[in-house]
């Protein structure tokens, strides 16, 4: 087990509670984008959440009638996800580079984890084979060239890609008014681009024909 794997194993209990200053704001907004961005999801659709951690996103998706399948390489994270979500979710240990669901899924998500893909383009191609509506991931534009990620998605068969700014702080809780103003700024065009030079990420959604 690598040092990083040991760290995840030790931190599994209460992971989402410690990772997010305001977990409700962060995860509920992310879930809203999963449901609505590009091709909308409807009750009964299944979301495959790769590198799901403790399944923090799951409750916000199942609350809208979506089926949730969480996969993580750390057994302790899956144990915590099982404790958190119970029978409302399908949860299993697996590596995002190798895992394939038992059947097709409407959406595949890989949040805060795309850097674990051994070959990004190959990973996107594998996901395209079992994803019927959209693949979603987040990208830090100060770490990755967004255009290069989009090129890889298109090469994998995703013909439409949208990038939506995600302006909910991970480690800082904000007053309600400030949080609402930041979420509104996600749709501000040039202002959003300026903000992204210094902080926050994009959520990308990619679909095939």
Image (spheres, rainbow, N blue to C red):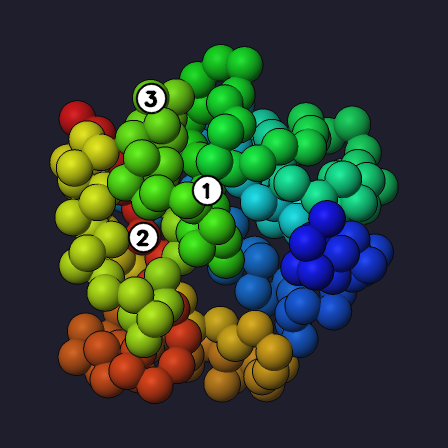
Q: Tell me the crowding category of disc 3: few under 14, some 14 to 19, or many 20 or more residues within 10 angstroms, Cα based.
A: few
Quick one: label 3 or label 2, which is nearer the N terminus?
3
Question: Which of the numbered marks, if any, corresponds to residue 109?
Answer: 1
Nearer mark to the viewer, of 3 and 2 = 3
Q: Residue furthest top?
A: 103
Please give the name of the residue rendered at 19% of the width and 73% of the height, measured from the top-left corner. 189
| Element under disc 3 | helix
Position of the C terminus by quadrant: top left
Q: Nearer the viewer, mark 1 or mark 3?
A: 3
The image shows residue 20 at horizontal and vertical percentages of 65, 69
Q: Is residue 36 visible?
A: no
Q: CA distance from mark 1 to mark 3?
A: 14 Å
Of 16 and 120, nearer the camera is 120
**Disc with the residue nearer the chain's start (1 vs 3):** 1
Q: Which secondary structure, mark 1?
A: strand
**Point 40% across, 57% down: residue:** 138
Q: Residue 182: x and y, percent?
A: 41, 79
Question: Which is more toward the observer, 90 or 28?
Answer: 90
How packed mark 1 is, by other alpha carbons closer than 10 Å (few <14, some 14-19, many 20 or more), is: many
Q: Secondary structure at mark 2?
A: strand
Would you name the residue on which mark 2 appears? 204
> Counting other residues with Cα less than 10 Å from the Cα at mark 2, is it few (<14), some (14-19), or many (20 or more)?
many
State whether residue 188 is above or below residue 76. Answer: below
Q: Residue at the location (32% across, 75% down)?
A: 142
Which label's residue is closer to the chain start, 1 or 2?
1
Q: Quick check: marks 1 and 2 in contact, CB under 8 Å?
A: no
**Rounded to the nearest whole Å, what is the CA distance between mark 1 and mark 2?**
10 Å
Tell whether 135 sits left or right of 90: left
Mark 3 sits on what residue?
129
User: Vertically, is 38 above or below 142?
Assistant: above
In the image: residue 23, left or right of residue 138: right
């Amino acid at each position: 087990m690598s040092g990083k794997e040991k760290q995840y194993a030790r931190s599994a209990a209460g992971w989402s509670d410690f990772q997010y200053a305001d977990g409700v704001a962060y995860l509920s907004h992310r879930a809203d984008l999963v449901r609505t961005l590009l091709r909308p999801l409807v009750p009964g659709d299944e979301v495959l959440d790769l590198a799901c951690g403790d399944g923090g996103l799951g409750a916000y998706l199942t609350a809208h009638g979506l089926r949730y399948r969480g996969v993580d390489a750390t057994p302790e994270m899956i144990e915590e996800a099982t404790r958190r979500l119970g029978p409302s979710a399908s949860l299993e240990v697996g590596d995002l580079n190798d895992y394939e669901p038992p059947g097709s899924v409407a959406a595949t998500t890989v949040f805060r984890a795309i850097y674990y893909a051994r070959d990004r383009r190959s990973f996107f191609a594998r996901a395209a084979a079992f994803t019927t509506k959209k693949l979603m991931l987040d990208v830090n534009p100060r770490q990755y060239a967004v255009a290069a990620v989009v090129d890889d998605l298109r090469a994998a068969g995703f013909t439409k890609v949208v990038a939506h700014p995600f302006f909910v702080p991970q480690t800082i809780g904000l007053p309600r008014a400030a949080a609402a103003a930041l979420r509104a700024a996600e749709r501000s065009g040039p202002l959003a681009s300026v903000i992204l030079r210094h902080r926050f990420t994009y959520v990308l959604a990619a679909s095939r024909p």
